[in-house]
């Protein structure tokens, strides 16, 4: 079965720039466990041949390992990258925004960071639960390492506390911490919420998985 990509590339042959859209869940269908999706993303990035890249994000997050892989590939990209937050950059999506040379956010968009989470559907003993907690702590540190490169004036302990508290930020707040470089006039955003599910410009986000929505 052909894997469904969670990104879209716009790269016209006669254009001096390219665009990468990351809308919706990151790796909501496939990423790890298969070789096709990571390789395809790398090939798509390579096909842009160093053109100035516009990265447009409207995502509630998703797979942190996929987000880190995308971050690393974007950091290795030879051309300049400008990211626009078109509605929401939350959870793992914030890792990807940090790969851009410049992040632009309108004043009606949302930025959220929180601790990594894991779903457990099994009977586990004390040692197994400790192992999971240790793994989550390690994953959190990898996220912190990315944030520290972007938010150069924010202490590591402050960022960790913000993740502990599941911090939702306006554009101004995100810029104050260093996640965002420039504010933009609000773009048209269509929002709705019903039964704990919010829709932002056709992107669906289930708020029930968050602690402080």
Image (tube, rainbow, N blue to C red):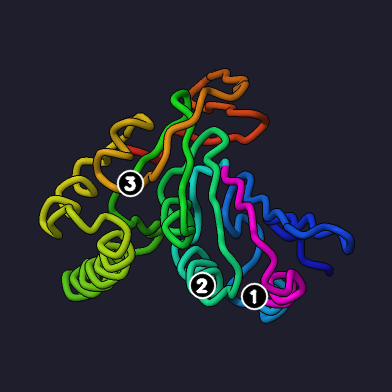
Q: Which secondary structure, mark 1?
A: helix
Vertical arrangement, residue 163 with respect to residue 18, above or below? above
Query: Horizontal and vertical percent for residue 83?
Result: 54, 49
- State the extent of the magenta-drawn residues as a range: 42-57
> Is 115 left or right of 185, judged from the image as shown?
left
- Local packing at callout 1 (Cα closer than 10 Å; few below 14, some 14-19, many 20+) is some
Residue at figure coordinates x 39%, y 45% from the top left? 181
User: Residue 101: which disc?
Assistant: none
Q: Is residue 4 magenta?
A: no
Q: Quadrant of residue 187?
A: top right
Question: Is there any visible trace of residue 208 in the rendered image?
Answer: no
Vertical arrangement, residue 19 with respect to residue 196, above or below? below
- Label located before the other in sequence (3 or 2): 2
Of 182 and 160, the residue lying toward us: 182
Q: Are marks 1 and 2 in contact (CB under 8 Å)?
A: yes
Query: Horizontal and vertical percent for residue 32?
Result: 58, 74
Determine which residue is flagged by label 3: 113
Q: Which secondary structure, mark 2?
A: helix
Of 13 and 112, the residue lying toward us: 13
Residue at figure coordinates x 31%, y 70% from the top left? 142
Q: Residue furthest right?
A: 14
Q: Is residue 45 magenta?
A: yes
Determine which residue is flagged by label 2: 69
């Amino acid at each position: 079965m052909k894997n469904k990509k969670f990104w879209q590339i716009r790269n016209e042959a006669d254009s001096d720039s390219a665009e990468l859209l990351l809308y919706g869940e990151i790796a909501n269908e496939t990423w790890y466990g298969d070789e096709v999706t990571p390789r395809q993303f790398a090939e798509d990035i390579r096909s842009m041949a160093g053109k100035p890249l516009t990265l447009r994000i409207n995502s509630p997050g998703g797979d942190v390992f996929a987000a880190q892989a995308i971050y690393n590939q974007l950091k290795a990209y030879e051309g300049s990258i400008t990211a626009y937050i078109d509605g929401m950059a939350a959870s793992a999506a914030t890792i990807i925004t940090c790969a851009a040379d410049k992040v632009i956010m309108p004043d009606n968009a949302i930025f959220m960071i929180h601790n990594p989470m894991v779903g457990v559907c099994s009977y586990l003993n004390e040692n197994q639960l400790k192992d999971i907690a240790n793994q989550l702590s390690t994953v959190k540190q990898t996220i912190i390492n990315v944030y520290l490169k972007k938010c150069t004036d924010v202490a590591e302990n402050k960022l960790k506390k913000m993740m502990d508290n599941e911090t939702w930020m306006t554009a101004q707040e995100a810029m104050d911490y260093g996640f965002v470089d420039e504010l933009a006039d609000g773009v048209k955003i269509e929002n709705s919420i019903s039964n704990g599910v919010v829709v932002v410009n056709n992107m669906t986000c289930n708020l029930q998985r968050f602690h402080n929505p």
